[in-house]
Image (cartoon, helix red, strand yellow):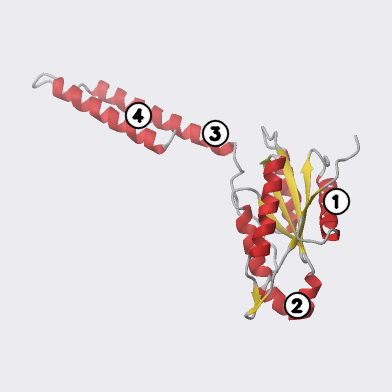
Amino acid sequence: MTTTDSETFKDKTEAELKILNEKRLPGHPLKKPLIEEMQRRQRERDEEIQNTQNKILSRTTPLRTEKEKEQKFGILVSPKQERVDFASYFSEPGAEANIGVVFLDIDDFKGFNKRFTETAVDRCLLPPFQQLLRAACMHRGEAYRHGGEEFLVLLPNHTREEIECFAERLRRQVETHEFSVDGEPAQITVSIGIALWPEHGDGFDDLIARANEAEHEAKAGGGNRVAFARRRAS
Protein backbone atom coordinates (compact mmCIF):
# COMPACT_ATOMS: atom_id res chain seq x y z
CA MET A 1 0.00 0.00 0.00
CA THR A 2 1.23 3.47 -0.87
CA THR A 3 0.43 7.11 -0.33
CA THR A 4 -1.35 6.94 -3.69
CA ASP A 5 -3.74 4.37 -2.21
CA SER A 6 -4.57 6.80 0.59
CA GLU A 7 -5.14 9.64 -1.85
CA THR A 8 -7.38 7.42 -4.01
CA PHE A 9 -9.42 6.43 -0.97
CA LYS A 10 -9.69 10.07 0.08
CA ASP A 11 -10.88 11.07 -3.39
CA LYS A 12 -13.44 8.25 -3.28
CA THR A 13 -14.67 9.40 0.13
CA GLU A 14 -15.06 12.98 -1.06
CA ALA A 15 -16.91 11.74 -4.15
CA GLU A 16 -19.30 9.77 -1.96
CA LEU A 17 -19.97 12.87 0.14
CA LYS A 18 -20.65 14.86 -3.01
CA ILE A 19 -23.12 12.26 -4.29
CA LEU A 20 -24.91 12.18 -0.96
CA ASN A 21 -25.14 15.97 -0.97
CA GLU A 22 -26.57 15.95 -4.48
CA LYS A 23 -29.20 13.38 -3.53
CA ARG A 24 -30.34 15.10 -0.35
CA LEU A 25 -33.65 16.94 -0.34
CA PRO A 26 -33.49 20.73 -0.66
CA GLY A 27 -33.29 22.37 2.70
CA HIS A 28 -32.03 19.17 4.34
CA PRO A 29 -28.23 19.39 4.60
CA LEU A 30 -26.16 16.24 5.09
CA LYS A 31 -26.20 15.25 8.73
CA LYS A 32 -23.02 15.98 10.70
CA PRO A 33 -22.73 12.41 12.13
CA LEU A 34 -22.51 11.01 8.59
CA ILE A 35 -19.76 13.44 7.67
CA GLU A 36 -17.84 12.55 10.81
CA GLU A 37 -18.21 8.84 10.04
CA MET A 38 -16.75 9.31 6.55
CA GLN A 39 -13.84 11.30 8.01
CA ARG A 40 -13.24 8.62 10.64
CA ARG A 41 -13.03 5.97 7.92
CA GLN A 42 -10.45 8.08 6.10
CA ARG A 43 -8.30 8.42 9.24
CA GLU A 44 -8.44 4.67 9.87
CA ARG A 45 -7.42 4.01 6.27
CA ASP A 46 -4.46 6.41 6.59
CA GLU A 47 -3.34 4.72 9.81
CA GLU A 48 -3.60 1.28 8.19
CA ILE A 49 -1.40 2.37 5.27
CA GLN A 50 1.17 3.95 7.61
CA ASN A 51 1.33 0.81 9.77
CA THR A 52 1.87 -1.36 6.69
CA GLN A 53 4.68 0.89 5.46
CA ASN A 54 6.34 0.74 8.90
CA LYS A 55 6.20 -3.06 8.86
CA ILE A 56 7.80 -3.17 5.41
CA LEU A 57 10.62 -0.85 6.54
CA SER A 58 11.24 -2.98 9.63
CA ARG A 59 11.94 -6.00 7.43
CA THR A 60 14.59 -4.20 5.36
CA THR A 61 17.96 -2.76 6.26
CA PRO A 62 17.85 -1.07 9.67
CA LEU A 63 17.34 2.68 9.63
CA ARG A 64 20.62 4.52 9.29
CA THR A 65 21.29 6.58 12.38
CA GLU A 66 24.12 9.01 12.90
CA LYS A 67 27.18 7.05 13.98
CA GLU A 68 30.66 8.07 15.08
CA LYS A 69 32.94 8.48 12.09
CA GLU A 70 36.55 7.32 11.94
CA GLN A 71 38.60 10.31 13.06
CA LYS A 72 41.36 10.58 10.46
CA PHE A 73 39.16 10.94 7.36
CA GLY A 74 35.64 11.28 8.74
CA ILE A 75 34.12 9.27 5.86
CA LEU A 76 33.55 5.73 7.12
CA VAL A 77 32.24 4.61 10.49
CA SER A 78 34.64 4.22 13.40
CA PRO A 79 35.93 0.68 14.08
CA LYS A 80 34.60 1.08 17.62
CA GLN A 81 31.12 0.77 16.11
CA GLU A 82 31.73 -2.59 14.40
CA ARG A 83 30.98 -4.80 17.39
CA VAL A 84 27.99 -2.68 18.43
CA ASP A 85 26.42 -2.89 14.99
CA PHE A 86 27.05 -6.62 14.69
CA ALA A 87 25.31 -7.19 18.03
CA SER A 88 22.34 -5.10 16.92
CA TYR A 89 22.03 -7.03 13.63
CA PHE A 90 22.39 -10.31 15.49
CA SER A 91 19.63 -9.50 17.98
CA GLU A 92 17.07 -8.12 15.53
CA PRO A 93 13.71 -9.93 15.63
CA GLY A 94 13.28 -12.13 12.59
CA ALA A 95 16.94 -11.93 11.54
CA GLU A 96 16.97 -15.28 9.77
CA ALA A 97 19.38 -14.64 6.89
CA ASN A 98 23.16 -14.45 7.09
CA ILE A 99 25.18 -11.58 8.44
CA GLY A 100 28.06 -11.03 6.08
CA VAL A 101 31.47 -9.94 7.38
CA VAL A 102 33.44 -8.63 4.38
CA PHE A 103 37.12 -7.85 4.98
CA LEU A 104 38.99 -5.71 2.41
CA ASP A 105 42.66 -4.92 2.02
CA ILE A 106 44.16 -2.63 -0.62
CA ASP A 107 46.69 -4.58 -2.68
CA ASP A 108 50.33 -3.39 -2.61
CA PHE A 109 49.47 -0.46 -0.36
CA LYS A 110 53.11 -0.02 0.66
CA GLY A 111 53.95 0.36 -3.02
CA PHE A 112 51.59 3.34 -3.30
CA ASN A 113 53.17 4.97 -0.24
CA LYS A 114 56.64 4.45 -1.71
CA ARG A 115 55.62 5.72 -5.14
CA PHE A 116 53.59 8.76 -4.09
CA THR A 117 54.46 9.27 -0.38
CA GLU A 118 52.10 8.54 2.49
CA THR A 119 50.92 12.14 2.62
CA ALA A 120 49.85 12.13 -1.03
CA VAL A 121 48.11 8.76 -0.65
CA ASP A 122 46.18 10.03 2.36
CA ARG A 123 45.17 13.13 0.44
CA CYS A 124 44.39 11.73 -3.01
CA LEU A 125 43.73 7.98 -2.84
CA LEU A 126 42.17 6.98 0.47
CA PRO A 127 39.36 9.59 0.56
CA PRO A 128 37.84 8.70 -2.86
CA PHE A 129 38.34 5.00 -2.17
CA GLN A 130 36.40 5.30 1.08
CA GLN A 131 33.67 7.33 -0.60
CA LEU A 132 33.30 4.60 -3.22
CA LEU A 133 33.07 1.98 -0.48
CA ARG A 134 30.50 3.98 1.48
CA ALA A 135 28.33 4.45 -1.62
CA ALA A 136 28.49 0.73 -2.42
CA CYS A 137 27.15 -0.10 1.05
CA MET A 138 24.33 2.43 1.03
CA HIS A 139 20.99 0.79 1.95
CA ARG A 140 22.76 -2.57 2.33
CA GLY A 141 24.87 -2.37 5.47
CA GLU A 142 27.74 -0.35 6.90
CA ALA A 143 31.39 0.26 6.02
CA TYR A 144 34.18 0.80 8.57
CA ARG A 145 37.82 1.78 8.36
CA HIS A 146 39.25 -1.15 10.29
CA GLY A 147 42.78 0.24 10.31
CA GLY A 148 45.45 1.40 7.85
CA GLU A 149 44.58 -0.02 4.45
CA GLU A 150 42.09 -2.53 5.91
CA PHE A 151 38.35 -2.02 5.74
CA LEU A 152 35.30 -3.90 6.95
CA VAL A 153 31.74 -4.16 5.67
CA LEU A 154 28.82 -5.66 7.60
CA LEU A 155 25.85 -6.85 5.55
CA PRO A 156 22.82 -7.92 7.62
CA ASN A 157 19.93 -10.00 6.29
CA HIS A 158 21.60 -11.06 3.03
CA THR A 159 21.82 -14.50 1.46
CA ARG A 160 25.20 -16.08 0.70
CA GLU A 161 24.68 -15.41 -3.00
CA GLU A 162 23.82 -11.75 -2.41
CA ILE A 163 26.91 -11.21 -0.29
CA GLU A 164 29.14 -12.89 -2.87
CA CYS A 165 27.64 -10.75 -5.66
CA PHE A 166 28.16 -7.61 -3.58
CA ALA A 167 31.82 -8.43 -2.96
CA GLU A 168 32.53 -9.27 -6.59
CA ARG A 169 30.77 -6.12 -7.81
CA LEU A 170 32.73 -4.03 -5.31
CA ARG A 171 36.00 -5.61 -6.45
CA ARG A 172 35.21 -4.67 -10.06
CA GLN A 173 34.16 -1.14 -9.11
CA VAL A 174 37.48 -0.52 -7.38
CA GLU A 175 39.49 -2.09 -10.21
CA THR A 176 37.84 0.04 -12.90
CA HIS A 177 37.64 3.31 -10.97
CA GLU A 178 39.99 6.03 -12.25
CA PHE A 179 42.00 7.01 -9.18
CA SER A 180 44.84 9.51 -9.45
CA VAL A 181 47.45 11.26 -7.33
CA ASP A 182 48.12 14.85 -8.32
CA GLY A 183 47.06 14.07 -11.87
CA GLU A 184 49.02 10.82 -12.18
CA PRO A 185 46.84 7.71 -12.71
CA ALA A 186 46.88 5.11 -9.95
CA GLN A 187 44.99 1.82 -10.27
CA ILE A 188 43.79 0.33 -7.01
CA THR A 189 42.73 -3.29 -6.52
CA VAL A 190 41.53 -5.05 -3.39
CA SER A 191 41.64 -8.53 -1.92
CA ILE A 192 38.37 -9.46 -0.22
CA GLY A 193 37.61 -12.15 2.35
CA ILE A 194 34.09 -13.13 3.39
CA ALA A 195 32.81 -14.87 6.51
CA LEU A 196 29.15 -15.53 7.26
CA TRP A 197 27.20 -15.83 10.44
CA PRO A 198 26.29 -18.49 11.40
CA GLU A 199 28.11 -20.62 8.82
CA HIS A 200 31.65 -19.61 9.79
CA GLY A 201 31.32 -18.69 13.45
CA ASP A 202 29.01 -17.67 16.26
CA GLY A 203 30.84 -14.63 17.62
CA PHE A 204 32.11 -11.40 16.10
CA ASP A 205 35.77 -12.12 16.89
CA ASP A 206 35.57 -15.54 15.23
CA LEU A 207 34.00 -14.06 12.12
CA ILE A 208 36.56 -11.26 11.86
CA ALA A 209 39.39 -13.81 12.14
CA ARG A 210 37.83 -16.07 9.49
CA ALA A 211 37.18 -13.18 7.09
CA ASN A 212 40.75 -11.96 7.61
CA GLU A 213 42.10 -15.44 6.84
CA ALA A 214 40.03 -15.54 3.65
CA GLU A 215 41.36 -12.12 2.65
CA HIS A 216 44.94 -13.38 3.12
CA GLU A 217 44.13 -16.34 0.86
CA ALA A 218 42.80 -13.97 -1.81
CA LYS A 219 45.97 -11.88 -1.58
CA ALA A 220 48.20 -14.97 -1.65
CA GLY A 221 46.41 -16.04 -4.83
CA GLY A 222 47.56 -12.89 -6.60
CA GLY A 223 45.22 -10.27 -5.15
CA ASN A 224 42.28 -8.54 -6.82
CA ARG A 225 39.97 -11.42 -5.98
CA VAL A 226 37.27 -12.59 -3.56
CA ALA A 227 37.60 -15.60 -1.25
CA PHE A 228 35.17 -17.23 1.19
CA ALA A 229 36.23 -18.45 4.60
CA ARG A 230 36.55 -22.20 4.93
CA ARG A 231 33.68 -23.99 6.61
CA ARG A 232 34.30 -24.64 10.27
CA ALA A 233 34.69 -28.24 11.38
CA SER A 234 31.41 -29.79 12.51
Task: Pick whichever, 152 or 52, lies toward us.
Answer: 152
> Which SS class for mark 4?
helix
Q: Please report contact status of discs 2 and 4: CB closer than 8 Å, yes or no.
A: no
Sequence order check: which comes first, mark 4 or mark 1? 4
Sequence order check: which comes first, mark 2 or mark 3? 3
Q: In the image, what residue type sits under mark 3?
A: Lys
* Residue at (69% x, 39% y) in the render: 159
* Residue at (14% x, 24% y) in the render: 22
> Which SS class for mark 1?
helix
Task: Pick whichever, 14 or 122, lies toward us.
Answer: 122
- Residue 76, position as x, y percentages in the image: 67, 60
Measured Cα–Cα span from mark 3 to mark 4: 20 Å
Q: Which residue is the site of mark 3?
A: 55
> Which SS class for mark 3?
helix
Q: In the current view of this chain or complex, which residue is farthest to the left? A: 26
Q: Which residue is the site of mark 1?
A: 209
- Residue 92, position as x, y percentages in the image: 68, 37
Q: Which residue is the site of mark 4?
A: 42
- Residue 211, position as x, y percentages in the image: 81, 51
Task: Pick whichever, 168 or 206, lies toward us.
Answer: 168
Taking 174 as reference, is 154 above or below it?
above
Q: Residues within 10 Å of mark 4 (few under 14, many from 20)?
A: many
Which of the numbered marks, if any, corresponds to residue 194?
Answer: none
Q: In the image, what residue type sits under mark 4?
A: Gln
Sequence order check: which comes first, mark 2 or mark 4? 4
> Which SS class for mark 2?
helix
Judged by depth in the image, the label closer to the viewer, 2 or 3, is: 2
* Residue at (26% x, 21% y) in the render: 34
* 183 left or right, relative to 208: left
